[in-house]
Image (cartoon, rainbow, N blue to C red):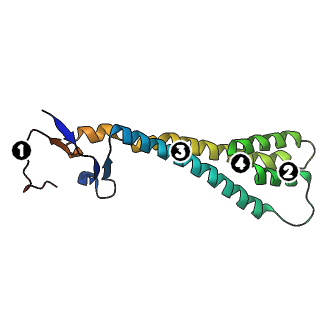
Amino acid sequence: MAFEIYTGSWTDWSRGSVLGATITLSSRDASLLLAFIAAFVTVIAVRLWVIICFTVHQILSTNGKHDGLYYQRQVILRNTKSAPAAAWLFLQQAWYWRGIAISAVTRTIPWALFCVCYFLGFAVLAVFSSQISDSFRISTTPQSQLRDTNAPREPWKTHF
């Protein structure tokens, strides 16, 4: 008995109209979609990092006299293009300024921790973006739109 798997969009009504919205793709197309989603998440993470750095830089910039730690933090926020690079620079900044500026470690370490959490969050998101693919459930349930190619076609019967 040969089966043809329906490819395209359909709704698994046993899961509802929102969670049941399903698209069935060939293996090649599904692999391309998953690779695109992982790359898209990575690009979004980089672009969002630039936006966050710009926003924080603008919020923290004030007129008046400041110490070197302040100016160095502003330079890091303005010029780093990735969260891991910023975390490393903030850790270096905390180390070098630890005995010079007032509360240098407590002013710098939270920024480094934020950078690390941001990076790890998007790393986990990129890895788990592959969970969109649920091929085992789709191919083994009765709702998976399997059609027997040897069975006679009965166009007047519609199954929901």
Task: Judge the density around disc 1: few (<14), some (14-19), many (≥20) Cα neighbours within 10 Å.
Answer: few
Quarter occupied by the C terminus: bottom left
Residue type at mark 1: give it: Pro
- In percent of width and height, residue 118 lies at 63, 47
Residue type at mark 2: give it: Gln
Vertical placement of 90 versus 59: above or below? Answer: above
Residue 81 circle label: 4
- In percent of width and height, residue 3 lies at 17, 37
Identified at 61% across, 42% down, the residue is: 120
* Alpha carbons under labels 1 and 2: distance apart: 75 Å
Viewer-nearest of discs 4 and 2: 4
The one of 56 and 30 positioned closer to us in this rendering: 30
Residue type at mark 4: give it: Lys
* Alpha carbons under labels 1 and 4: distance apart: 61 Å
> In the rendered structure, which disc, 4 or 3, sits on the residue that comes first in sequence?
3
Kindly identify which residue carries mark 1: 152
**Helix, strand or loop for disc 1:** loop
Identified at 33% across, 58% down, the residue is: 18
Residue 72 circle label: 2
Identified at 28% across, 42% down, the residue is: 138
Vertical placement of 60 versus 69: above or below? Answer: below
Kindly identify which residue carries mark 3: 39
* Alpha carbons under labels 4 and 2: distance apart: 16 Å
